[in-house]
Amino acid sequence: MKSRYVSELKYFIFIIINPNLNFMRKLSFFLLACLLIFSCNSEDGNNDNPPKLNITFIMDTSADRLDNLGDPAVMPVGNAGQHPDFHVLGLHFIGLYPDQFTPYDGGSMVFLSPTTEAGGIAAIDFEQELFITPDNNTFSVPLSQLESGTFEYFRSSIGYQKYDIFYNLGGASNNNPDWPQGISDDVDVEGTVASFLGYNTYIESYNLKNETVSVFENKVQGYFGLESNGTVSGYNFNNVSEGDAPQTTVPNPIDATSPVPAGSCVVTGRFPQALVIPENPTEDINIQVVISINNSFEWEDYNGNNKYEPLLGEQVVDMGTRGVFPSVQ
């Protein structure tokens, strides 16, 4: 198109400067040249904006709370949970699957972040994940880069989560000699959690609220860092701790026909109405993916007061998401 445009434009310029043509003839050719330029620019603009698949992620505290098999899950006796306040969701891959019998590695890939062996063996490269935030929660890809077909299931590997929680300082007065005398430690404070849910993740460093944690090694699923700081009755605290959650819930309602690798944190959800990608798409397709964080931060509540009290020995038992619900908009 550009070569044709250049050659025709040269022809019009030649006509316009031709002394043998009168003014009205030159004006007519000039207007035709402007029309040609506008037409070419319009075609080029259309090529620059091909139809896309737009995926918008919503972290929802009210969505159904599911177990590993995609069934409704109640809080186990002796445990408690809370809805985290999300800041970042990191994704390792996004895939579309025609039906419940499609193998884990047989879907249509929409996004895949790189892996690295910098930590000794292959692992997700944390820095290269797709990061979703509340203010930037839509991922788009040209439909021309995707396979056409009908897809009933959506899958995504969640590699990283960053969010705020509340925990109680119960036990601080007994464990810390600097705690002010006569001041109760029954105080709720805010903490920032960074948790890594992929099968294996190479991490150079990561940011919490104010602090940066250097790692420079692989971490398996369940590793997390927690930062808390503040002032209680004149007592200043600023602390970063690291740990490992013993389990991560990964809802997969088609586990019987299409299981996922252990430790992969690949969540699965079914479209209420199948997603159809035509062979020659002409317009955008928009889907919404609701991710349940309904009491997704779970701990052993030894004294039954529904407060997370790590200084009293209460342990995190689960920090996985609790369901994924895709829909075509």
Image: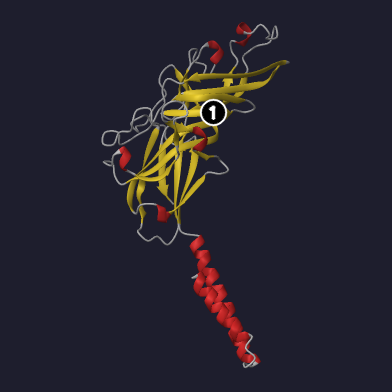
Identity, as a three-letter code, of the amino acid under mark 1: Glu
Q: Answer above or below: position of 109 versus 198.
A: below
Q: Residue at x 53, y 74 (%)?
A: 5
Residues 308 and 161: in front is 161
Secondary structure beneath dot 1 equals strand
Q: Which colour scheme is used?
A: secondary structure
Q: Is residue 166 visible from the viewing direction of this image?
A: no
Q: Is residue 251 left or right of residue 309?
A: left
Q: Which residue is drawn at 64% across and 85% down?
A: 17
The image quarter containing residue 74 is top left
Q: What x and y, as percent, mark residue 35?
A: 56, 78
- Mark 1: give few (<14), some (14-19) or many (20+) Cα within 10 Å: some
Q: Answer above or below: position of 204 versus 283.
A: above
Q: Which residue is drawn at 32% across and 35% down?
A: 253
Q: What x and y, as percent, mark residue 166?
A: 57, 24
Q: Answer above or below: position of 167 versus 178.
A: below
Q: Is residue 41 left or right of residue 74?
A: right
Count of number-bearing discs:
1
Q: Is residue 249 visible from the viewing direction of this image?
A: yes
The image quarter containing residue 170 is top right
Q: What x and y, as percent, mark residue 210?
A: 65, 27
Q: Is residue 160 left or right of residue 268?
A: right
Q: Mark 1 points at which residue?
A: 204
Q: Answer above or below: position of 234 versus 87.
A: above
Q: Is residue 221 left or right of residue 178?
A: left
Q: What x and y, as percent, mark residue 296?
A: 47, 28
Q: Residue at x 32, y 39 (%)?
A: 105
